[in-house]
Image (cartoon, rainbow, N blue to C red):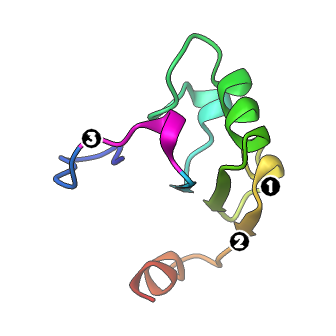
Amino acid sequence: LAAHGHWLGGDVDFHEADSWMLVGTNPLVSKAIGIPGQNPSQGLRAAVERGMKLIVIDPRRSQTAARAAIHLQPRPGEDVTILAG
């Protein structure tokens, strides 16, 4: 799910996702991007408990990153390299 521009990959059901990758965002503080419901913290916690793998790419150790199975902390400008593979 993209926060900027248009996502052309079809609809993504958060409740059925095996993994979720967030890049440079902290939806637990800045309101949920793609996390349904009134309480993004509770929704994310429930998803992780059911087995969803949360991947966060963010140089900051945010509240969302603290719940991630994988937290990559790139230096400035390295996020593009990570996403390019």
Question: CA gap, disc 2 to disc 3?
Answer: 28 Å
Q: Which mark is residue 73?
A: 2
Q: Earlier in the sequence, mark 2 or mark 3?
A: 3
In the rendering, at what x and y percent does residue 81 appear? Answer: 47, 87
- Mark 2 surroundings within 10 Å by alpha-carbon count, few (fewer than 14), some (14 through 19), many (20 or more): some
Q: Which range is magenta?
A: 11-17
Q: Is residue 75 left or right of residue 31?
A: right
Q: Amino acid at mark 1?
A: Arg
Q: Amino acid at mark 2?
A: Gln
Q: Which mark is residue 11?
A: 3
The residue drawn where x is 51% and y is 47% is 17
- Mark 3 surroundings within 10 Å by alpha-carbon count, few (fewer than 14), some (14 through 19), many (20 or more): few
Q: Earlier in the sequence, mark 1 or mark 2?
A: 1
The residue drawn where x is 59% and y is 35% is 27
Q: Are marks 1 and 2 in contact (CB under 8 Å)?
A: yes
Q: Secondary structure at mark 1?
A: loop
Q: Which residue is mark 1?
A: 61
Mark 2 or mark 3, whichever is nearer to me: 3
